[in-house]
Amino acid sequence: MNANPPAPLSERTISVVKSTAPVLEKHGEELTRHFYERMFRENPEVKPLFNASNQSGGTQQRALAGAICAFAANVDQLEVLGAAVERIAQKHAGLGILPEHYPIVGSNLLASIREVLGDGATDEVIDAWAEAYHFLASILIGRESHIYTIQARDEHGWNGFRPFRIAGKERESETIVSFRLQPVDGGMVPGFKPGQYLTVRVPDGEGSTTMRNYSLSSAPCADHFRISVKAEEGGTVSNLLHGLDVGAELEVGPPCGEFFLDLTEHHTRPLVLLSAGVGVTPILSILESVLAEQPEREVVFIHGAINGRTHAFRNHVKDLGKRHNQLKVHVRYSEPTDEDRSSQRHDSEGFIDAELIESLAPRKDCDYYFCGPKPFMAAIYQQLLAWGIPGSQVHFEFFGPREELESHA
């Protein structure tokens, strides 16, 4: 496979692939479970490229099943899948996926289709899916090659993983710690688009490595990156990071991600930033960046936390609100303590809802960026759709397979 534009799919292939959509929808999760088990058994060298937590929880399998069904249903109008392709390509670039990985995935996927669907997986079906997979893989390889080229050409940029040192740690809440990361070689770091993430690679304790994505939590800085990590219950990597001391080394990939605020665009619409929990991390990067680069823009920042103990960056955001007249800050706690109330650490109680957003936003016609737990994300997403906000004005980052959110909404 190469990065050249793929030949268009034949009409016969399109017809056959579309005809398999119903049966794939019925057997999707069974197929993807079988696929991952088969691939990790036959090609264990690719296992470190996949999130073990998402695997054990089944989210990766459900996400892949949804992606396969979406591809089958829309194979005759692939422009519908453009945003999904970009999201996948960015994720792959963060993980260091290379062209040689695609035949491994393809051979195991086709074998799994044959093994799970049995008599339904005729030679015609397998041949059609082989052509369709090659077509999609060629598109992804081309886009990923372009991303790698841009990363390498960026001043201070790189490809793959680069050694970084923890230059500082700061506790932001009971569960969230910020890490200031500097290159071991003493060099500078490239700029990034506010909202993007880093991929961190660490030993898995079994002689291999594992990777996780963490949003950059500050505006770009020339000599370091900052990520802010929540210690998840049972989270292998997050708890490992929390236990590391200043001076410890990590392998870090270059910034990636399709969720970001494009500071080269200048909109007259107000900007509404919504976050809950650790979802504040990419939103804070966007907030700091827009205040620095577009200080005249009207910004509404709404954050939800359980209480003061779990509320990260409280004083920092409060200070930003005091220093910027165009910024309106509102904090809502779902379970405030008596101390929270007496200290006036929050502005309202409950969950972030449409009524609150409408009361704070200058109007509904705004640009919306949001990130947080699944129920929060689904509620915001539904509300913006109900208001008729165009998709070009709705931007979100979901920590996990995107299909998990869209099926919940």
Image (cartoon, rainbow, N blue to C red):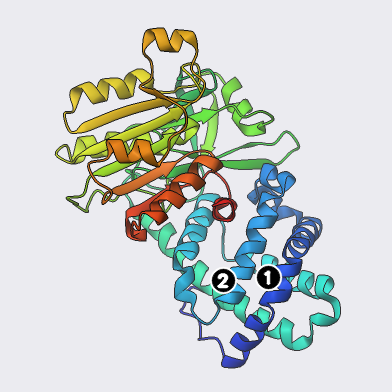
Of the residues under marks 1 and 2, which one precedes in the sequence? 1
Labelled pair 1, 2 in contact (Cβ < 8 Å): yes
The residue singled out by tag 1 in the image is: 106
Question: Left or right of 227: which side holds 60?
Answer: right
Residue closer to the observer: 98 or 29: 29
Question: Left or right of 396: which side holds 210?
Answer: right
Element class at badge 1: helix
Q: For the point 28% across and 33% down, which residue is it?
A: 288
Q: Position of residue 111 (x, y in %)?
A: 78, 72
Q: Which amino acid lies under the numbered mark 2 shown in the image of this protein? A: Ala
Relative to 387, say whether 222 is above or below.
Answer: above
Q: Can residue 173 be seen here?
A: yes
Q: For the point 46% across and 33% down, which residue is it?
A: 276
Residue 103 is drawn in which quadrant?
bottom right
Q: Residue furthest front?
A: 355
The residue singled out by tag 2 in the image is: 137
Question: Left or right of 203: which side holds 6?
Answer: left
Relative to 311, say whether 71 is above or below.
Answer: below
From the image, which quarter does the N terminus lie in?
A: bottom right
Q: Residues within 10 Å of mark 1 (few under 14, many from 20)?
A: some
Which mark is on residue 369? none
Q: For the point 57% across and 46% down, which residue is it?
A: 400
Q: Which amino acid lies under the numbered mark 1 shown in the image of this protein? A: Gly
Element class at badge 2: helix
Q: How many marks?
A: 2
Question: Left or right of 38: which side holds 190?
Answer: left
Residue closer to the observer: 337 or 33: 337
Q: Position of residue 177 (x, y in %)?
A: 49, 23
Q: Position of residue 194 (x, y in %)?
A: 34, 43
Q: Residues within 10 Å of mark 2 (few under 14, many from 20)?
A: many
